[in-house]
Structure formats: C-alpha cells, structure tokens
Amino acid sequence: MFDLDKWQEVLHTLRRNKLRTVLTAAGVLWGIFMLVLMLGFGNGLERGVMQNMVGFVSNSVYVWGQRTSKPYQGLGPGRRIRFSTLDIAAIESSVSGISALAPRNQLGGWQEGNNVSFGTKTGNFGVMGDYPELVEVDNIEILSGRFINHSDMADQRKVVVIGQHVREVLFEPGQSPVGEYIKIRGVFFRVVGVQRSSLPGQEGERGNSTLYVPFSTFQVVFNNGNRVGWFAVAAHPDVRGEELEAAMRRALSVTHRVHPDDAQAFGSYNAAEKFNRMQRLFAGVKVFIWFVSIATLMAGALGVSNIMLISVKERTREIGVRKTLGATPGAIVWMILQEAIVLTALAGYLGLFVGVVTLEGVASLVSSDSGPLAAPSIDFNVALIAAGVLIVLGAAAGLAPARHAAQIRPVVALRAE
C-alpha cells in the first residue's frame, strides 16, 4: 500500500543535504545522458550508412577482369583478362545459385561520356549495353515506358532506356520522351522507357545520366564483337553472396586458364558481404556503447552508495530510535533502498529527458543529404531498458548502506554522537 509519509520522509532527507544530493545525482545524470546520446548517434550513423547502400540489391555480386599475378599452364603473369560471350555459357553451366545473370558493356572508357542528341539539344552521357535481367540486380525503377526485353535482344532492336537526368537535359518539361528518337554517336535509337536509379549520391547521379541499349544491339551497332565488360549477378535468397562470388571466380579461372590461387586476376564486389560487415560493425559499436555507458552509470551508482553510507552514519541515532520503537531490519533496509532508488531514478530520468531533447534538437538540424549521418534517434524500447537499468543500479547502490544500517545495534546507536 502507498505510504505518503514514507515518501515525504525520503524527499525530506534528500532536501536536507541539497549540495551533496545534487553532486551525487550529477554522476547518474551524466551516465544516462551519455548512454542516450551515444545510442542515438550510433543509430543515426547506422541508418545513414545503410541509406547510402539502399540502391544495391543485398545479394548482388559484380565480377570484372584484371591482370594475372601468377604464371599458369605456360602463361606468364601480367596477362590481361578480357571476358567474352563464351563466358556466359560457362557461368550458366557451372555456377549454381544464380537468380539473374546480366553481362554488361560500356561505350567508351570507365565513366567516359558519349555524345547524345535530340533535335537541337545535346548532352554527354554514359551508354551501356545490357541484358533485361539487369533490373533484378541493380534495382532500377522505371518511371515511364518499359525496360529493354528479350524481344529487343533477339531482334537487335535499336531501342534505348534513358535516365531521368537525360530526359531533363534533352526534352522539354512535361514532354514524354517515350516513342521519340535520339541519336547516340550518330545512330538513331527509339526511346522505350525512362528510369531512375535507386542509388544515393554520385552513384545515383551517374545512373540517372545513363542510357541502356540491348546487349546484342550494342555489339553490332558499336562494333563491340563478343566482348563483355563485366558480370552483374543476383544470388538466390538461400545462397550466400560469398559462395556465389567464389563460384564465379572458379568458373572464370577455368575458362581463362588462371591459377586457382591468383587473387589478382579478377576484381569483384560483393554487396552481401558489405551488408554483413556493416551489420557486424554496428553490432560491435552498440556493445561498446552499452559497455561504456553501463560503466559510467556504475560509477555514478558507486557515488550514490558512498553518499548513502555517509547518510546512514549521520542518522545512526535516528536508526537506533526507530529500532527501539519496533522497526524491523527489513523496514530499515527498505527505508535506505527507497532513498537510493529515488535519488538514482530522479537523476536518471532527468538525464534521459535531457538526452532525448538534445537528440531531437540535433535531428532538426540534420538534413537528408548529410552524408553518412542520418537524424539521430533512440528507440522507445531502449529507453525502457535504460529505465530498468536505473532501477537495478539504484537498488544495488543502496543495498550495502541498507545492510549496514540494519546491522546497527540500538544500544550502540543511541550512544552515538
């Protein structure tokens, strides 16, 4: 049952030594404030990094040719690996777990633009030769029209899908480019769709400034022969990206006569591995944050325990009188625990409030394009856990002083000065 007199007595005891109470509470307040602040900024950093990866399919793998570093089967090191359409059949026959295989070619060099025009307007954009399966690997969003399909590939149609930025440069506002003809290096292509890249930052800008033509058309029109620039692959949901990447390397090593231990012959990017690495990193960061914050809170709780011991010593005569009048050891223990819990809880909740207000203030200043840091925030469940930790620490802080008070003999206590 709620006893108002006991709670008034607890508050009176805390007010009686205001400076000591404030200095003791400051340690607990600082600990919970730092916990909230570090968790909030940790969550903001995690969300910001993950937002920068949102356009990548988490099970996608990219493989390209480089130079060999080891001799093998009579071939010396330093040999340039160049993919061809023959590698497509080799991959399909020997690599399992592929849900989408998209060989890719690029017109010109890496990040090199090409002259593209419509009417009197001209721009410099990237031009890619792609398979329809690319939409399953690169998460391309079609704004209007469609993406290239297998009929375009079979008939080697001169069709093109343009990026959002390409439409803004070459066409008037409100004008639909679908069905219009644009010129790429002097060759006319009919626009069948407009796409927007889901990638953030420079990658997204590059994707929005790119044109996609059927792979087979690209080979013929731009005299690309049977060359393949690189492979973009999506794995089945039940296949790990690392396994698919290793299988791709093994298959290509056989077709290109590359030493099995040559790690330099092929370059690769594994989105799944990067996702997993980031998740492990942030899990470790959260463990570190909780460790540091709990250590800080324990230091504050130790200060509370010391202050309660001093309080018990100062109130030795009072405790003796209480015992003489019939107070049980349990009642004495509960009285001291109440004071410790109230002091810890009040300081902790004040620190929690200040921390949340600080996070909200910072969140209002952080824009959506603030790089790797998104708006910091703390989960409500974490706040509840912090509240539980405070209660436990408050009880632990008062336990030793309470046991000491319960062991005081009334006769000794009444003689104390």
Image (spheres, rainbow, N blue to C red):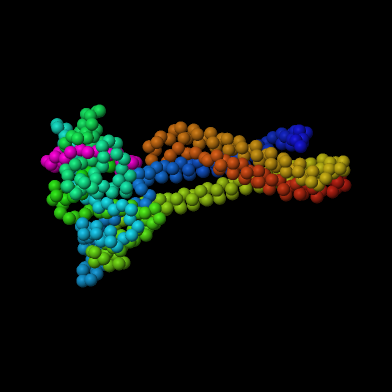
Q: Which residues are magenta?
A: 183-203
Residue drawn at point x = 52 percent, y = 40 percent: 378
Does 82 appear above or below 43?
below
Quarter holding residue 117:
top left
Nearer to me, 213 or 338: 213
| Residue under the point 44% across and 33% down | 365
Place of residue 336 in the rendered image (x, y in percent of width and height, measured from the top left) = 74, 43
Q: Quadrant of the C terminus?
A: top right
Horizontal side of 98 relative to 212 (left or right) equals right
Q: Is residue 188 magenta?
A: yes
Q: Is residue 395 above or below residue 176?
A: below
Return the x and y of residue 72 as percentages of the image width and height: 24, 69
Q: Quadrant of residue 257?
A: bottom left
Q: Nearer the viewer, residue 398 or 228?
A: 228
Q: Residue at x 77, y 49 (%)?
A: 404
Which residue is located at x 56 percent, y 50 percent? 291
Query: Does residue 284 show up?
Result: yes
Tell me if 326 is positioned left or right of 93 in this view: right
Residue 412: horizontal and vertical position, in percent? 85, 47
